Image (cartoon, rainbow, N blue to C red):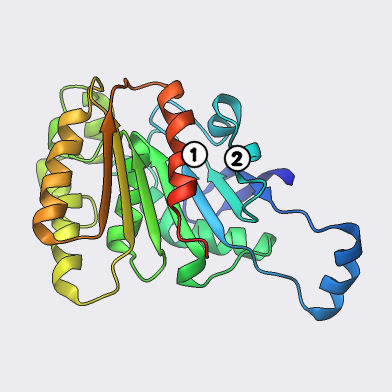
Amino acid sequence: MALIQCDFYSEVLGLSMSMNVILPQAAPSQIGMASHAGQTKHKTLFLLHGLSDDHTIWLRRTSIERYVAALGIAVVMPAVHRSFYTDMKSGGKYWTFISEELPAIARSFFPLSDRREDNYVAGLSMGGYGAFKLALNKPESFAAAASLSGALDLRDLNDRVSLDYNLIFGSQEKVDELPNNLFLAAEELAASGKPIPKLFQCCGTEDFLYSHNLRFREHAEMLGLPLTYEEGPGEHEWGYWDSHIQRVLAWLPLE
């Protein structure tokens, strides 16, 4: 595997941004063949961080590089600050960045497939919200999405992160509308006739976001979405996420 820290400029945000990228590495005997036959475009997992983290955190707190080594997939881990993957009321257009600009930039730098069936997204906490937000609002771009301890119900976050909440959303109206409201996005997708990404959702029963996950699970099941749901003992911490990202990788439709 190759591990690359990539610093680049975002036109959408007007900022220098960063992502870490894990790439499969060809054997020496295959390198010349690839240059003649056309470079392999890798299946890709976009792996998203939580509210207080950045693009380095999955590498620092889990063994993600080791876990994907035998799978032959690329992993793209971008930074999005404390944005909730949203076009902020008082801040940058992070939804436009993560849903449009970042995938295009990553594919311009690295040999990543742009085919829907080769692209997946996963994340923890705020990143679990971001992963489902991408899958439900951009189903043409992702075959599967996973939320680990996701902050899936924005209506229940104002008291906990009030400053961020006001800067990002500004009003309840923005919370309730697309693409921000995952419950509404799920309803719209279920009624659209579009291909629906496979969904994986897990949360620890002692996690402060457990109620979020129960509400979304019930909603997804009512709509008939293809959801795999797991719960069990666990809190909002890296031991749980290091264990369950391995469950996600085993679940991904890589074949």
Q: Which residue is drawn at 39% across and 45% down?
A: 92
Q: Quadrant of residue 151?
A: top left
Q: Name the residue under label 1.
A: 246
Q: Is residue 63 above or below residue 138?
A: above
| Residue drawn at x 24%, y 24% as measured from the top left | 161
Residue 183 at x, y = what percent? 15, 51
Whole-percent x and y of residue 144?
A: 39, 58
Q: In this view, does 255 lie to the left or right of 186?
A: right
Q: Would residue 11 be visible to someone looking at this image?
A: no
**Residue 51 vertical position relative to residue 69 in the rendered view, above or below:** above
Instruction: Give residue 159's mark.
Output: none
Residue at (49% x, 62% y) in the render = 119
Answer yes or no: do the residues labelled 1 and 2 have beta carbons within 8 Å? yes
Residue where numbered disc 2 is placed: 67
The amino acid marked with disc number 1 is Gln
**Which one is nearer the viewer's eye here, 89 or 193?**
193
Q: Is mark 1 on a helix, strand or loop?
A: helix
Q: Which of 157 and 90 is in front in this view?
A: 157
Judge left or right: residue 226 versus residue 15. left
How many residues crowd around disc 2 within 10 Å: few (fewer than 14), some, or many (20 or more)?
some
Q: Which residue is drawn at 34% across and 33% down?
A: 125
Across and down, in percent, residue 171 comes to 13, 41
Residue 72 at least partly seen: yes
Eyeballing the image, is 161 above or below 16? above
Three-letter code, disc 2: Tyr
